[in-house]
Image (cartoon, rainbow, N blue to C red):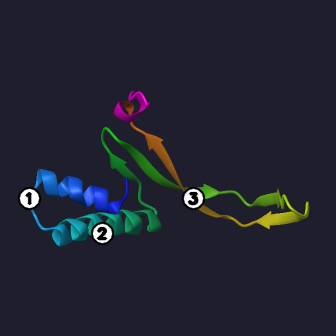
Amino acid sequence: MIKIDIANSLMKVHPCSRATALQVVDLLTERLKDALLNGHRIEIRGFGVFEPRPRKRGMGRNIKTGASVQIPKGKSIRFKPGKDLREIEVK
């Protein structure tokens, strides 16, 4: 599913123009992105939790050359599915 699919689903539930639906989807993704960049946890009940978490600094290895590579300290986004999402049987 891509952004336009989400907008089309929104248009089916709430009659509006495609441009308005795309604006709503863009606004939602921007707000989620801003919250994560500011270190906030996002919980969507029944779906899951997005959480920025610290990533350790360490040593890695370049697969092609075999050379050691320093992995910088940083943050990554973790997603933990909610109970309803975990119970869905994937085909």
The residue pinned by badge 3 equals: 76
Q: Nearer the viewer, mark 2 or mark 3?
A: 2
Q: Earlier in the sequence, mark 2 or mark 1?
A: 1
Circle 3 crowding by C-alpha within 10 Å: few under 14, some 14–19, many from 20: few
Taking the magenta stretch, the answer to whether it contains residue 85 is yes
Q: Earlier in the sequence, mark 3 or mark 1?
A: 1
Residue type at mark 1 is Pro
Q: Which residues are magenta?
A: 84-91
The residue pinned by badge 2 equals: 26
Q: Earlier in the sequence, mark 2 or mark 3?
A: 2
The residue positioned 38% from the left and 29% from the top of the image is: 88
Q: Tag 3, which secondary structure?
A: strand
The residue positioned 35% from the left and 41% from the top of the image is: 47
Q: Tag 1, which secondary structure?
A: loop
Instruction: Using the image, tell me which numbered label, if any, was put on residue 15.
Output: 1
Q: CA distance from mark 2 to mark 3?
A: 22 Å
**With respect to residue 38, does 87 lie above or below?**
above
